[in-house]
Image: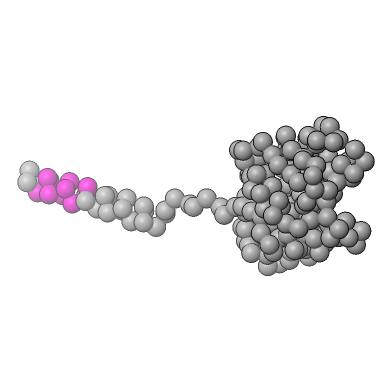
């Protein structure tokens, strides 16, 4: 009887040990890294550089307004229907953070006030044979002191990223940098369209 009890105890101990080893060798998988969109001087410089010569000249001359927003919660980033999905695609972005950053840049200055009332953001990826690049579209409803309520959109494409070195790596530095530039470019494109409406108003 005692021998049976000892055998059962040893067996239970062995099973517990196996379970402990299994837990050690099969840890829960960490969630994939995601790109977090944040304004920065590097992204701003990269976005401006990718604009057309005419658009750069307009920014250098200065936009005739300052911008504000009532959007205080992060905006959800939707996936473009035609695009492949990646686990590192941004899921939300703070429009207010970008407004605060851009208000400190020289191009934004003027007596007109523009308020971003609503915003919708979409993300996608363009694929080529050896490269791919992130794209963003921003759709906004803005209220201007001299142009009333207008609906505008901006589209931005980031620099090419190598599929060989960056496609399988979530949120790689180069893909993250390209996404930051693409979103900033989309935002600047939207501001340039707002400027056209303000100038006409």
What percent of the width, then of the height, locates residue 14?
A: 24, 53
21 vs 175, left or right, is left
Look at 84% across and 32% down and name the residue there: 148
Q: What stretch is highlighted in magenta?
A: 3-12
What percent of the width, then of the height, locates residue 46?
A: 76, 63
Look at 73% across and 59% down and name the residue there: 44
Q: Nearer the viewer, residue 138 or 70?
A: 70
Q: Tag count in the figure? A: 0
Colour scheme of the picture: one colour
69 vs 28, left or right, is right
Look at 72% across and 34% down and name the residue there: 117
Q: Nearer the viewer, residue 69 or 123?
A: 69
Q: Residue furthest top?
A: 149
Q: Residue furthest left?
A: 2
Residue 78, visible in the rendered structure: no
Residue 4 lies in the magenta-colored region: yes
Residue 96 lies in the magenta-colored region: no
21 vs 199, left or right, is left
Q: Is residue 91 above or below residue 145?
A: below
Q: In this view, does 121 lie above or below 10?
A: above
What percent of the width, then of the height, locates residue 100?
A: 66, 49
Q: Which of 66 and 89 is in front in this view?
A: 66
Residue 44, visible in the rendered structure: yes
The quarter of the rendered structure image containing the N terminus is: top left
Q: Is residue 152 above or below residue 160?
A: above
Which secondary structure type mostly characterizes the magenta part of the structure? helix
The quarter of the rendered structure image containing the C terminus is: top right
What percent of the width, then of the height, locates residue 24?
A: 36, 56
């Amino acid at each position: 009887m005692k021998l049976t009890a000892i055998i059962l105890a040893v067996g239970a101990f062995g099973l517990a040990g196996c379970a402990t080893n299994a837990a050690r060798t099969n840890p829960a998988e960490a969630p994939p890294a995601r790109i977090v969109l944040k304004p920065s001087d590097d992204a701003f410089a990269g976005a401006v550089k990718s604009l057309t010569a005419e658009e750069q000249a307009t920014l250098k001359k200065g936009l005739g307004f300052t911008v504000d927003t009532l959007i205080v919660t992060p905006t959800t980033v939707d996936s473009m229907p035609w695009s492949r999905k990646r686990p590192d695609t941004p899921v939300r972005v703070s429009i207010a953070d970008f407004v605060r950053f851009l208000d400190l840049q020289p191009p934004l200055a003027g007596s007109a006030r523009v308020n971003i009332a609503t915003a919708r953001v979409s993300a996608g990826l363009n694929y080529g044979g050896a490269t791919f690049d992130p794209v963003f579209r921003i759709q906004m409803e803005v209220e201007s002191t001299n142009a009333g309520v207008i609906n505008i959109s901006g589209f931005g494409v980031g620099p090419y990223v190598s599929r060989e070195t960056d496609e399988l790596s979530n949120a790689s530095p180069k893909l993250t940098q390209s996404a930051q530039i693409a979103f900033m470019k989309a935002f600047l494109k939207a501001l340039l369209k707002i400027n056209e409406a303000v100038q006409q108003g």
